[in-house]
Amino acid sequence: MDAFAEARGVFFISLDATTVAPLSGAQRTWVAAQLAAATAYPMRIVYGHVPIHPTTVGRETEVLNDTAFETLLRTHGALFIGGHQHGYFPGAANGVRHVVTPCIGAGPRPLIGTTAPSARGFLVIDIAADRITSLEMRTGAGFTSTLPRSSLPPELRFGTHLLTRDDRAGY
């Protein structure tokens, strides 16, 4: 079930996005209505299990692949966070900032175009003054290290999908 919440001036939408397919028309309409009603919140974050674009080897086709949904996110300036791929990549595509979360448990996968499994870790987002001030992966022993952006590929490409690393895309 989809849901929304507000916390400390940030508007969050949690999607029931576990199916490898575009969102249903009804679900997209609901998201559009929530984002349109959230004009008082300059920071909007939408998250769900399956990402819009692929990031890892072996899961290249396990995505939402939903250009209409991505357009909706761009229109409302929302960040999209997905999982499922088991490989961290902070990127941008088509005017939308995307983050695919890292794997903290079993089965980390190599990013597209690489061969070594991604590091295990978790995502930390700091928000201040109505903007993201830090979006980083914590990794290493005790998860006290920050994974350097420079250790990630500058972009990930699969078919028509292209994710540019967020720092290279101006974020």
Image (cartoon, rainbow, N blue to C red):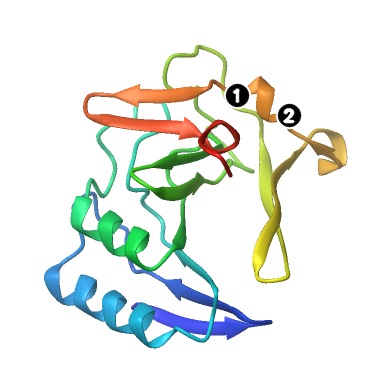
Query: Amino acid type of disc 2?
Result: Pro
Examine the image and state in which quarter residue 124 appears. Answer: bottom right
Q: Is residue 166 left or right of residue 134?
A: left
Which sits in the foreground, 25 or 33? 33
Examine the image and state in which quarter residue 148 appears. Answer: top right
Q: Residues within 10 Å of mark 1 (few under 14, many from 20)?
A: some
What residue is at 65 percent from the left and 64 percent from the top? Answer: 131
Query: Amino acid type of disc 1?
Result: Leu
User: Where is residue 117 shown, x and y percent of the image?
Assistant: 56, 21
Q: CA distance from mark 1 to mark 2?
A: 8 Å
Residue 110, relative to residue 121: is it above or below?
A: above
Residue 164, relative to residue 34: is it above or below?
A: above
Rendered image: mark on residue 148: 2
What residue is at 60 percent from the left and 24 percent from the top? Answer: 152
User: Where is residue 52 shown, x and y percent of the image?
Assistant: 32, 47
What residue is at 36 percent from the left and 51 percent from the top? Answer: 50
Q: Secondary structure at mark 2?
A: loop
Location of the C terminus (image quadrant): top right
User: Where is residue 56 shown, x and y percent of the image?
Assistant: 42, 28
User: Where is residue 75 shown, x and y percent of the image?
Assistant: 33, 64
Residue 129 is at least partly visible in this image: yes
What residue is at 53 percent from the left and 22 percent from the top? Answer: 154
Residue 57 is at least partly visible in this image: no
Rendered image: mark on residue 152: 1
Q: Residues within 10 Å of mark 2 (few under 14, many from 20)?
A: few
Q: Secondary structure at mark 1?
A: loop
Location of the N terminus (image quadrant): bottom left
